[in-house]
Image (tube, rainbow, N blue to C red):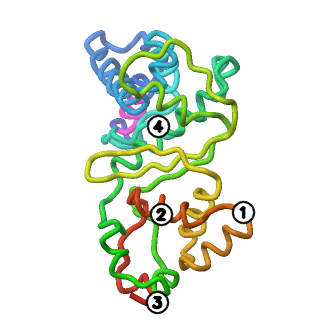
């Protein structure tokens, strides 16, 4: 290994270490502080609801621990912190806040949605030009910005309560699993509480099934549900991409 390469490895290790090595000149502290400050700011921007739940001091402490164990793999920090939800689930604080991982996971989906590629969505105007038979035969795709998730806690309700305007004195949501649909319209990201059938229908569509096959599979998995409402919810939220010629059998 060349002398330059050896120095670079030592320098990176010195920046990431919990404590600066004794042989590091004091002037090098600026690199350590700048590196950590950038990661902490990124976590604060990407997980604002988690920061609200934990409080500034505890969030900063946990973020510092995470940043030292998970250095950024890219100079672009907009998507930094993908492992943060799982990191939080292994911390003692999650014993008292069992929904913390799910809220963090929901925030991660929000961030991914916001920065995802754009594409025209399948909106009501496009649907109006299609017959019922053609609609069933459509092989549509989930929009690149669409995210959806299944959570074992009322994470969606808790997330909405913290992000809504105004204060809330005490939140006591019904303790049950929830599903979220995260979509983007322009630069606006929306988080919607959906039911199991709507979530399952999205999974079937994501598997590249035609609409009729996706509905049939969902009906078998969730009998008795109104899948017309589920499909209308998906379309109205701009969760699907407008079909291209190669995506459809009939248009």
| Mark 3–mark 1 distance (CA, rounded to whole Å) | 29 Å
Q: Are marks 2 and 1 in contact (CB under 8 Å)?
A: no
At 40% from the left and 61% from the top, the residue drawn is: 144
**Residue designated by label 2:** 232
Task: Please state if 35 lies on the left or on the right of 134 as rendered.
Answer: left
Work out which residue is located at the far bottom of the displayed protein and give it. 250
Measured along the vertical axis of the image, is residue 201 above or below residue 3? below
Q: Position of residue 139 (x, y in %)?
A: 48, 80
Would you identify the image quadrant in which residue 33 lies?
top left
First in residue order: circle 2 vs circle 1: 1
First in sequence: mark 4 or mark 2? Answer: 4
Instruction: Report which residue position mark 1 lands on.
Output: 224
- The reply to whether dot 2 and dot 3 touch (C-beta < 8 Å) is no
Q: Secondary structure at mark 1?
A: loop
The residue mark sitting in front, 4 or 2, is: 2
- Mark 2 / mark 3, whichever is N-terminal: 2
Residue 150 position, x and y percent, is 62, 47
- Does the stretch in magenta take in 7? yes
Is residue 213 or residue 6 the one in the foreground? Answer: 213
């Amino acid at each position: 290994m060349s002398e330059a390469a050896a120095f670079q490895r030592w320098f990176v290790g010195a920046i990431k270490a919990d404590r600066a090595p004794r042989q590091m000149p004091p002037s090098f502290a600026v690199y350590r502080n700048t590196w950590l400050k950038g990661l902490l700011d990124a976590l604060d921007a990407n997980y604002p609801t988690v920061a609200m739940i934990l409080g500034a001091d505890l969030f900063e402490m946990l973020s510092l621990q995470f940043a030292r164990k998970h250095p950024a793999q890219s100079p672009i920090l907009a998507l930094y912190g993908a492992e943060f939800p799982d990191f939080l689930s292994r911390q003692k604080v999650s014993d008292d806040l069992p929904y913390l991982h799910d809220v963090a996971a929901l925030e991660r989906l929000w961030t991914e949605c916001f920065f995802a590629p754009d594409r025209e969505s399948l909106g009501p105007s496009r649907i109006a030009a299609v017959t019922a038979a053609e609609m069933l035969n459509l092989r549509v795709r989930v929009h690149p910005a669409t995210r959806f998730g299944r959570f074992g806690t009322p994470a969606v309700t808790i997330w909405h309560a913290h992000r809504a305007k105004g204060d809330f004195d005490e939140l006591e949501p019904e303790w049950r699993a929830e599903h979220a649909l995260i979509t983007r319209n322009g630069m606006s990201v929306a988080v919607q509480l959906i039911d199991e059938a709507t979530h399952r229908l999205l999974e079937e569509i994501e598997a590249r099934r035609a609409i009729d096959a996706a509905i049939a599979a969902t009906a078998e998995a969730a009998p008795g549900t109104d899948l017309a409402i589920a499909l209308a919810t998906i379309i109205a939220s701009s969760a699907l991409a407008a079909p291209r010629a190669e995506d459809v059998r009939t248009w």
